[in-house]
Amino acid sequence: MDLILFYLRKLLRTQNEVLVLPSRVAVVLFFLFVLLLPMFTKDTYILRIFTLTSIFALLAASWDLPLRF
């Protein structure tokens, strides 16, 4: 229980720092949009497109390519 409270306090303490950058706000909004999309549409094509878009966005964000010239 102490561990859960520790992480909850840590999350609430850093909440103001996380959403400072506009790019992070866009990511949070896109994430919420993808989570809420199945409530508004049952079209499997649209759901599949947004699912694959999210997977490829995570893959692209996880690449750490050093730029060496």
Image (spheres, grey):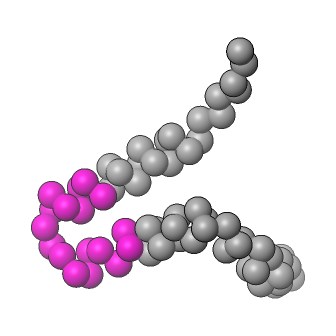
Chief secondary structure of the magenta portion: helix
Quarter of the view holding residue 39: bottom left
- Is residue 22 inside the magenta stretch? no
Q: How many marks?
A: 0
The residue segment tinted magenta is: 33-50
* Viewport quadrant of the N terminus: bottom right
Residue 17 rendering spot, x and y as whole percentages: 77, 74
Compared across the picture, whether 55 is left or right of 40 comes to right
The residue most toward the top is: 69
The residue that appears at 46% across and 68% down in the rendered structure is 31
* Viewport quadrant of the C terminus: top right
Kindly tell me whether residue 26 is visible in this rendering: yes
Q: Is residue 26 above or below residue 10?
A: above
The residue that appears at 24% across and 55% down in the rendered structure is 48
Quarter of the view holding residue 67: top right
Q: Is residue 50 above or below residue 36?
A: above
Kindly tell me whether residue 1 is visible in this rendering: no
The residue that appears at 30% across and 58% down in the rendered structure is 50
- Is residue 45 inside the magenta stretch? yes
Depth check: give the residue in front, 57 or 22. Answer: 22
Depth check: give the residue in front, 68 or 51. Answer: 68
The residue most toward the front is: 69
The residue that appears at 61% across and 68% down in the rendered structure is 22
Residue 44 rendering spot, x and y as whole percentages: 15, 62
Q: Is residue 7 above or below residue 24?
A: below
